[in-house]
Structure formats: structure tokens, C-alpha cells
Amino acid sequence: MKSYYGIFKMEFKGELQYRAKAISGITTQIFWGFLLIYLYTAFMNSNSSNDFTLLQMTSYIWLGQAFFAMRYVTLSKRVADEITNGNVCYKFVKPISIYEQWYFEGLGQKIAATLLRFLPIVIIGVLLPNNLKLMLPVNFEAFILFIFSLVLGFLMTEMISMFGVYLTFKTMSGKGAIGFISAISGLFSGLVVPLPMLPQGVQNVIKYLPFSFISDLPFRIYIGNVNIIDGLKFLLIGILWLIALYAISKLLINKSLKKTVIQGG
């Protein structure tokens, strides 16, 4: 475990050096936050819903932008290059699991990127007028459960990203593999459209899929759209999904590693 912590720490420190990248990310997320809020405000004014208020919607959007780096399913270009150009062979000589090595690399990068971006966006969101602002948590219990569910969502994001690693082995195209998974994840996690704005029948299916635990569940707990009892139930379901995804993704990647053929000398 000490080796994986060292990998995590190295990637974490490396990502912290990209401050210009963080500034551009903050600017982009604030721009998209305003854009999405104005778009969905117009939609909600013509399609009112008592279950999802305007303040809850604006808070949902700002939370999504603040923690965008944490919940966006992506694959490190370095990992994709290692697979496609054959440099993955160097991983085999290290006495540690390749799967866990890639997983902890991704965790370190995502946490560092999130820490550099989320606070300015949260501060700006809280200080905005009522029709644009980020609300405070509905209560202390919801905030604590929000933190736990946010961590679960973060682990889930990187776990789903590992399926992108598997597809890269199968297709030898990192962009195609992760693009496919990112599109599905973004749609079903609330990244594109807040899930409470979808038809109830669609919500009843999506809320049990692993993608909804990435961001929709923690954000809805924060804004009070999901109560504490239901939040705890869904948190348990999310943990079961996390275990299942770990077992399946590791099995698939290990099978791919066993069949890996490195050409050249």
C-alpha cells in the first residue's frame, strides 16, 4: 500500500504545478456555470416543478462546476500512450499491480485538479444574487452525508475510467474509448442535464445506475432534494456498485495484460 501512496503523492504534486491550467479551468467552469443556469432557468420558468426549485437548480450547477475535475470521467493521455505505443511493457517489471498503479495515478491527478479549482467557484457561487447563487447545505447532517457521498462519487469516477483503460487495450485508441465512456457517464451522472429535470420514469432507472453516484446523489443530498434516510440507502447501493465495478474492471484489465504482445526490440 505504501507504493501506491507514493504513486498517488507523486501524481498529486505533479498536477499541483499546473497553476495556469487551473486558472483557465476555473474561468471555463464559471462561464459554463452561468450559461447552464440561464439555460435551465428559462426551461424551468416554462416547466415548473415543485420537486426541484430554482435555487436547488443553481446550487446543483455550481456544485457540478466546482467539482468538475473530480467527477469528469477521463483517461490520462500518458496511460493511453503507454498502451498504444508499447511502453506498458515497463510496468511489468515493477513488483506492484499495474491496475492499482493506474488507479492511484488517476486519483492523485483528479484530487489535485479539484483542490486547485473548487474553492474560488464555491466562493463566487455563494456571493451571487439569489437567482444565481449557490445555497448552503440544508443542514449539518446533509453536509456530512454530502462529503461521504462525494468521496464515493470520486472513487466511482476513477473506477469507471478504468473501463476506458480496458477499451483502449481492445481498440488501441484512447480517445475513442474514453470518449464513449465519457459521453455515457456525462449523460447519466447529471453532467449534461441535472437528473431531477428529467422525466420521473427515466429518473427511476438512472438513479440505480453507477453513474448517478458520481455527482447526482451528493448534489441532491446537499440541496435537500434527497433526504438523509434515502441518501444512506443509496450510499449503500453505491458502495456495492463500487465493489462490483472494481472486481469486473480488474478482471478485464488483467485478462488484457496477459494477452499483451509488445512488438519490436
Image (cartoon, rainbow, N blue to C red):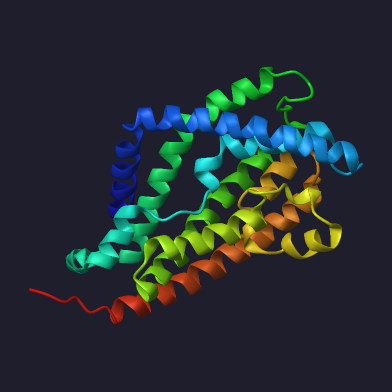
Asked whether residue 131 appears in the rendered view, the answer is yes
Q: Could you tell me residue 114's position as x and y percent?
A: 48, 37
- Relative horizontal placement of residue 260, taking residue 25 as reference (left or right): left
| Image quarter hosting the N terminus | bottom left
Which of the 4 image quadrants contains residue 91?
A: bottom left
Vertically, is 81 above or below 64?
below
User: Residue placed at 53% from the left, 68% from the top?
Assistant: 245
Asked whether residue 143 appears in the rendered view, the answer is no
In-front residue for pair 87/143: 87
Q: Could you tell me residue 191's position as x and y percent?
A: 63, 48
- Relative horizontal placement of residue 89, taking residue 27 as reference (left or right): left
Vertically, is 76 above or below 119?
below
User: Residue placed at 27% from the left, 78% from the top?
Assistant: 260
User: Residue placed at 43% from the left, 27% from the top?
Assistant: 23
Q: Could you tell me residue 167's position as x and y percent?
A: 42, 71
- Relative horizontal placement of residue 252, taking residue 245 as reference (left or right): left
Vertically, is 152 above or below 261?
above
Q: How many marks?
A: 0
| Image quarter hosting the C terminus | bottom left
Q: Could you tell me residue 63's position as x and y percent?
A: 64, 36
- Relative horizontal placement of residue 232, taking residue 22 as reference (left or right): right
User: Residue placed at 70% from the left, 49% from the top?
Assistant: 217
In-front residue for pair 241/27: 27
